[in-house]
Amino acid sequence: MELRLRPPASPASSSTRGTVVSPTLRRRSCSLPQIQKQLAGGSISVSRRGAAARSPCSTLMAAAYNTGTADLVDFNWDTLGFQPVPTDFMYIMSCSSDGVFTNGELVPYGPIQLSPAAGVLNYGQGLLEGLRAHRKEDGSVILFRPEENALRMRIGADRLCMPAPSVEQFLSGVKQTVLANKRWVPPTGKGSLYIRPLLIGSGAILGVAPAPQYTFVVYVCPVGHYFKDGLSPISLLTEEQYHRAAPGGTGDIKTIGNYATVVSAQKRAKDKGHSDVLYLDPVHKKFVEEVSSCNIFMVKDNVIITPLLTGTILPGITRRSIIEIAGNLGFQVEERLIEIDELLDADEVFCTGTAVVLSPVGCIVYHGRRVEYGNGKVGAVSQQLYSALTAIQKGLAEDSMGWSVQLS
């Protein structure tokens, strides 16, 4: 397996064939317990200049904390959007042909080098996940339903003939990465830490077949709103030429290829002033499916309706959470087929997803017809659900569902 991770501006890594992580990087890598122990025990003394450290882990942590304080990086949080921001550490764990993942570790955030014959590069054998960490008012950090992401990755891995980390391994990697980058978790009300786990076929393969080795990576990035206008209603253009997924395909798993196919239509929509694209089913071309990167809901006469999962729609974790929250709030919730004409006649429409959270829809264009909702304002039901969801995610309300995972 030819996978090496090279931290920026470090000495050249060893090119020995078969290594997973370069020897230089292995000497500098460290586990979360080591980091926590050194921080708690005072063996890491970090000054504003990042000086003083007596071990490889200490050196890494000192470098990580050379700006701001050990609690929060010196960063203009008001400028956060949804773009990459390099952080301090990422997590990597690999498996060989036996399909068993072992020896996960934290390493400095940096580029990944792969063989040009890697399965993920040639045949798209890869999955991604997305979840968030929030900083509570007391400074501690919480995750929202991370075990659901772990389970969904395992389902996707089975479909793509890939071994996957266990739920416990997935959670461990996520927790270690978040805590190692805790200073990058935005202050309460300023955003969140977006967590991106990846599972890729990293081994070299020439013919169409499962890769011989796989790598699990977790990196994080502080983010603000997905759409530039925040909670302001978005505009959707209904796609009439392309389809996101087909029956019997991979629309219901989070494979990387699903997102590459929506970029062209999304770009055309944005060029016309819209926020994103609404997709219809590929068979009848009249049933609503989802938006490029999120699920969709409608409200009619106080009934909340979302498309039925038929194998072409991603089973979103936020989607499921909204369904459960709405039921607890006393709403009638229906999962069923929705024709586009019914959606256009809705009282409210909103999208859900880890990235978008809950985003109200202010306008949908279909066959040149423009339909507006709520006079440019957030609908009452959308606002109620958004407030209930984010209060749990941010630790502002009691989590009677048991969804939150406290990290520190």
Image (cartoon, grey):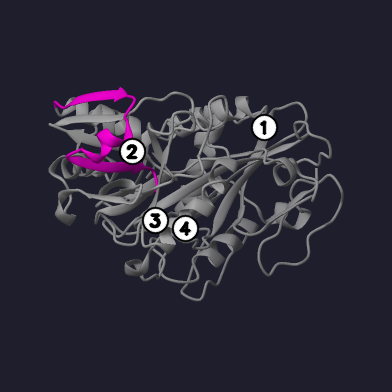
The segment highlighted magenta reads 330-355
Q: Amino acid at mark 2?
A: Ile
Q: Are marks 4 and 2 in contact (CB under 8 Å)?
A: no
* 367 in magenta: no
Where is mark 3, residue-wise? 185
Q: Are marks 2 and 1 in contact (CB under 8 Å)?
A: no
Residue at left offset 43%, top offset 63%: 271
Q: Earlier in the sequence, mark 3 or mark 4?
A: 3
Measuring from the top left, give residue 230's x and y in whole percent. 29, 58
Instruction: Give the label on residue 296, or none.
Output: 2
Front-most of 399 and 129? 129
Residue at left offset 30%, top offset 60%: 190
Where is mark 4, residue-wise? 268
* 351 in magenta: yes
Q: Earlier in the sequence, mark 2 or mark 1?
A: 1
Disc 4 crowd rating (10 Å Cα; few below 14, some 14-19, many 20+) is some
Q: Secondary structure at mark 1?
A: strand
Q: Secondary structure at mark 3?
A: loop
Residue at left offset 48%, top offset 58%: 267
- Left or right? Give the position of 142 relative to 232: right
Q: Earlier in the sequence, mark 1 or mark 4?
A: 1
